[in-house]
Structures are given as C-alpha cells and as structure tokens.
Amino acid sequence: GLTRLPFSIGHHLPNLRCLNLSNNFLIELPSSFRFFKCIEVLNLSFNHLKIFPILSHSNLRVIDVSHNNLTSFPPNLALQCHNLQSFLVDGNPASDVLPPLQKRQKYKI
C-alpha cells in the first residue's frame, strides 16, 4: 500500500470528483491536497492518519476517515464543507466529535 502521496498530486488532478485512498499506510496528506476543488467523495478509511486533513472543499458530500488514528476533528468542518451528507469517523480514538455535525441530523456519523 501507499505510505505517502506525491507532493503535487492536487495540482495535477484539479477536476477529480472521487478519490479512494482506503486501505493504505498514509500518515498525512500533502498540502497540495487542498487543490482538489471538484472533489465530492473522499475515502481515506483504514489508513494511519493522525491529523485530520485540511479540507475547504465546498463540493464534498462524503468523507470517510474511519479506522485511522485521528484524535480530533476541526470544529469548522461543517462551515467549510456545507454540502456534506455523510461523515464516517468510527474506529478512531477521537474524543471530540464535531459539535456542528451532531446537531444537524442529515449527517451519518
């Protein structure tokens, strides 16, 4: 499996809509990841992520970060990803689940 992604991956695939990086050994994502402006579905499940990736993609509908090593989630994720419908976080040692998402019932948490 993958242990890291090329630094420039976001620059080369700006129109990507669905990205499945599940079942790898990723610890972090490159900063160029923020350039995936069209991404709607992001699957990062079953990796070794310790820090939640910086996401400011308003098109994101599905985020799966289940079964990683995440201990917290950004409190402003609901504002940044306002089209979010499904946010899967099970299997993480996170102690604080996103309060804004807990209040909105359309999310599958």
Image (spheres, rainbow, N blue to C red):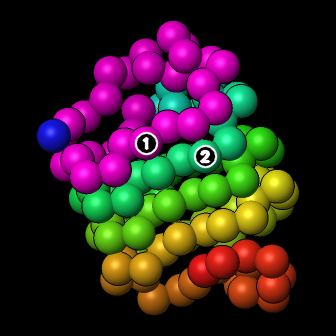
Question: Is 52 within the magenta?
Answer: no
Q: Is residue 72 visible?
A: yes
Q: Is residue 51 visible?
A: no
In the image: residue 42, left or right of residue 68: right
Which residue: 64% across, 56% down?
A: 62
Residue beneath label 2, please?
41
What x and y, as percent, mark residue 43?
47, 51
Mark 1 nearby-residue class (10 Å; few <14, some 14–19, many ≥20): few
- Which callout, 2 or 1, points at the residue further toward the start of the chain? 1
Overall secondary structure of the magenta section = loop
In the image: residue 49, left or right of residue 96: left
Report helix, strand or loop for mark 2: strand
Report helix, strand or loop for mark 1: strand
Can you say whether 21 is above or below 108 in the image?
above
Q: Which mark is residue 20?
A: 1
Q: Tell me the amino acid under the disc marked 1.
A: Asn
Which residue: 32% across, 21% down?
A: 6
As rendered, which of 82 and 53 lies closer to the eye? 82
Which residue: 82% across, 55% down?
A: 83
What x and y, as percent, mark residue 73?
55, 70
Contact between marks 2 and 1 (CB within 8 A): the answer is yes
What x and y, as percent, mark residue 107?
73, 76
Question: Is 17 within the magenta?
Answer: yes
Span of residues in magenta: 2-30
As rendered, which of 2 and 72 lies closer to the eye? 2
Which residue: 43% across, 16% down?
A: 8
